Image (tube, rainbow, N blue to C red):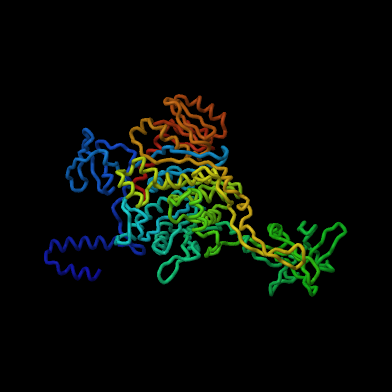
Amino acid sequence: MAAIHDLLAQVQDEALRSRLEQEINRLSKTKKFGLVFEEHLPECTPLYDIPVKKGSLAAKKTGSVSDLYEVCAIKEGMATCCHKVTKEKEEIPAEDLVCVAQFGEPIYPYLKLVDSVRNGGDSDPWHTLIEADNYHALQLLEYLYAGKVDCIYIDPPYNTGARDWKYNNHYVDSNDAYRHSKWLSFMEKRLRLARKILNPGTGVIVIAIDDNELNSLGLLIDEVFDGYKKFCITVVHNPNGNQGKNFGITNEFLFFVLPSGDQLLSLENRVDAPDIRPLRDVSGNSNLRTDARNCFYPIYVKDQKIAGFGDVCEDSFHPCSANIEREDGVTEIYPIDASGIEKKWVFARNTVESITDELHIEWNNSRKIWDVIRYKTHFTYKSVWNKKAYNANSYGTKLLNKILGEKRFDYPKSVYGVYECLKAVCGNKKDALVVDFFSGSGTTLHALNLLNAEDKGHRRCIMITNNEVSEAEARSLAKKGLKPGDDAWEKYGIARYVTWPRTVCSIKGINTKGQPLPGDYGTYHEEYIPDTGAKGKYRKVKAADNPVLADMKMSDGFKANAAFFKLGFLDKTSVALGRQLAQLLPVLWLKAGAVGPCPQLKEEKADMLVLPENHFAILIDEKYYQDFAVQIDLHPEIRTIYIVTDSEAGYREMITGYTHRDTYQLYRDYLDNFRINTGRQS
């Protein structure tokens, strides 16, 4: 700043010098410390399904989405447009324009059902894929699930400079001097919304990243998730390494961001690398019976299996041997060493039963007795993950190509790497809600279905992705005279060409040609097991890392359901007048928990909708409240109630009997949320 003031003193024009000094002082007061990046022009989203009309904010389909025009008039297919910056007027064919939404403007979103797949029962989760810009979709999720999401997993663009992501509809490459600040501006908006939908006490966000933005992302997390704990995990996803200069990179990173407080993550199951040691305490100090009397008790064994645990022995009782065989065929095992010294078990009598499944007996050939051995397989996660199952080529690219029948997507994650993240965060929450707003090829939903199948969970996933085509595909389609928004263009977008086909195929157990998927979901390792033919001998075998997953054939698919929606925007006035219930029904279904198939409005002038199979009901005409109340009493499974009324007092009176249910006033609740949302995104 001193250099700037020295230069300022050289300005001869006193008025100009004074004005510059004021601006410099203003900027110095607003200077940010820590993470500093440029605030860029507001992001814009093209709305290809919204018709262009007088008063629309629009851009040219072949131009920049941030190069905006106001449509002044349309006559015989030609639009008279006024440029928002230059104010110059231009005649443009209406078919060459697309409506645009700027971030920060009030939006009133709805969801249009595109497709669905059902392979589970009514009680099985209905996952959802939402085709949308993820910023607007996150605004919708704030209305639906503020503070209710258990886990967010995202794999955002890594900003490698390889033109793999867009800002304001333009690819960002290594020649863009502002690519890092654009990326941070892009991410900050979305992470601030993400924090709002996370459960503030237990919700965890996991973010995959490489070294291009690792440090910047870490600082951004500190800023957005103030008060949270941040852990950076190294994942070996490419054991062979890339072919870069100086180093062959084998790894990427995961940020786990957790609320401060108690232990939130599950323990890692390392069945392929167990900690094997005697249950008898063999530590150097304090391992005698007299050091902890409640750790000296018999362990009962019958037919070479743990049969139970005896009481803590009286101080006066001293067993004659480490093994005492009883007449009923039970062997009592005591923690006595080879010298006959009474030791102690590692676990006290009141806690040993918690590890029963980890205990085995093993013949000690030198002492000719049975020993109790603990095979510990569950541990706190380490900060380096390097299992073979995390190989992105073997269990990401090759798996996806097998499902889709061809290569349609670059660098998908290993399904087992994402599965491990989800298991760590919500392994103990079988009804968890998981969100991925950079869903790419759909690995997160695939991984969550694996976890649900493993432990019979009912976790639900919401995936969000746009429908952009690759840069090469865009050039090819443009040569054919096609434009974004054309059906022939959109069918090659990521949501419709990759994410949804993978979702359908993995659930049904088939590839895109309808053929059964080969193989199973097991990954394998080699281990040594006791040779049943000779005591004290071991043999090498191929064993499943996870026996449950190994038993799951890919062709069996998953007992799950999923719905595919496209996000659109409604006219505020039409919503207020109650003309958009059919369009809003999927939104209300999601808000009520997405139970059962998404309903559709069959009667245009219905007085009420009572949907016990979906666990919600809507009173459309308040004159029929008494009849509505009778129906609600008949269906205790209804957990969410929507009441359409303009009267706040009337609404309060009608919900007095429903304190044990979730209630919402339509359409005020919806309209107020998105109007207010506009001013509070930061």
Say whether residue 189 is visible.
yes
Q: Residue pushed farthest right?
A: 327
Q: How many marks?
A: 0
Task: Give the residue displayed 53% in from the left and 41% down from the top.
Answer: 561
**Quarter-of-image position of residue 274:** bottom right
**Quarter-of-image position of residue 49:** top left
Left or right: 155, with 7 as reference point: right
Task: Give the residue displayed 53% in from the left and 27% down from the top.
Answer: 631
Task: Give the residue displayed 46% in from the left and 34% down from the top.
Answer: 642
Whole-percent x, y for residue 429 in the image = 57, 50
Say whether residue 429 is visible.
no
Q: Which of 23 and 466 is in front in this view?
A: 466
Left or right: 432, with 138 as reference point: right
Left or right: 143, with 178 as reference point: right
Q: Nearer the viewer, residue 327 or 674?
A: 327
Task: Give the residue displayed 80% in from the left and 73% down from the top.
Answer: 340
Whole-percent x, y for residue 294 in the image = 74, 64
Whole-percent x, y for residue 68 in the image = 25, 46
**Quarter-of-image position of residue 578:** top left
User: Height in image: 615 above or below 26?
Assistant: above
User: Height in image: 575 above or below 463?
Assistant: above
Whole-percent x, y for residue 593 in the image = 51, 40
Which quarter of the figure is the N terminus placed in?
bottom left
Q: Residue pushed farthest left?
A: 13
Left or right: 654, with 63 as reference point: right
